[in-house]
Image (cartoon, rainbow, N blue to C red):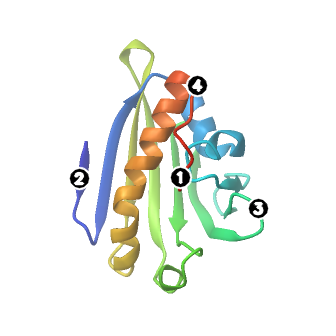
Amino acid sequence: MTTMTETTTQVYQLYIRATPEQVWDAITKSEFRRKYFFGTSIESTFEAGASMRSLSPDGTEVWGDNTVLESDPPRKLVHTWRSLYDAELSQEEDSRVTWQIDPAQGGLSKLTLIHDRLEGAPKTAAHVAGGWMWVLSGMKTLLETGEAFPAFE
């Protein structure tokens, strides 16, 4: 399910055949993340107040330098969002991303991703709208089948 008000809040929900711990690891561990998040790696302790840096696939560029606002493994991660890989996007205000992981029946987890506070980041809102579906679909496929989507080109 996707709900989008284009400029303020984007909400995505899906069920994944994985435990909340497996979903948390997919979000926070680079070896998973590289396989579904455009080849990027991530550096953070994932504790509230910590820096959360996303690096380009070759590790030479910082594509995101954000802050963890809330962390409750394996249930919830909230962080700021500002894309640094694009000059126009990097000039916009920070927005916020919330990853909510809830256990569900039958060995499933319900993942809700909310990208909000986009009022000061209209280009980011437009840019990530299609990107989140790719990322979440890739994560689900990887966790359920062990296979990654083809490389993003």
Q: Amino acid at mark 4?
A: Gly
Residue at the spot of label 3: 59
Amino acid at dot 3? Gly
Instruction: Say which quarter of the image contains residue 73.
Output: top right
Image vertical order of residue 132 relative to residue 116, above or below: above
Q: Is residue 117 visible?
A: no
* Helix, strand or loop status at disc 2: strand
Pinpoint residue 1: horizontal percent, then vertical percent: 25, 42
Q: Secondary structure at mark 3?
A: loop
**Looking at the image, is mark 3 or mark 2 nearer the viewer?**
3
Q: What is the spatial separation of the Cα atoms under label 3 and label 2, in whole angstroms?
A: 33 Å
Question: What's the CA distance linking mark 4 and mark 3?
Answer: 24 Å
Ranked by sequence position, the earlier of labels 2 and 4 is 2
The residue carrying pointer 1 sits among few (fewer than 14), some (14 to 19) or many (20 or more) residues within 10 Å by Cα, namely few
Left or right of 114? Residue 56 is right
Residue 126 location, quadrant: bottom left
> Could you give the CA–CA distance between mark 3 and mark 1, rounded to whole angstroms?
16 Å
Q: Quadrant of residue 60?
A: bottom right
Q: In the drawing, does residue 44 fall left or right of residue 96?
A: right
Q: Residues within 10 Å of mark 2 (few under 14, many from 20)?
A: few
Q: Which mark is residue 146?
A: 4
1 or 2: tag closer to the N-terminus? 2
Judge the density around disc 3: few (<14), some (14-19), many (≥20) Cα neighbours within 10 Å: few
Query: Closer to the N terminus: mark 3 or mark 2?
Result: 2
Residue at the spot of label 2: 3
Give the label, 2 or 4, closer to the camera. 4
Q: Label 1 near label 3: C-beta < 8 Å?
A: no
Q: Is residue 141 left or right of residue 117?
A: right
User: Badges 2 and 4: C-beta atoms under 8 Å apart?
Assistant: no
**Eye-nearest disc, 3 or 1:** 1
Q: Which secondary structure lies at badge 1?
A: loop
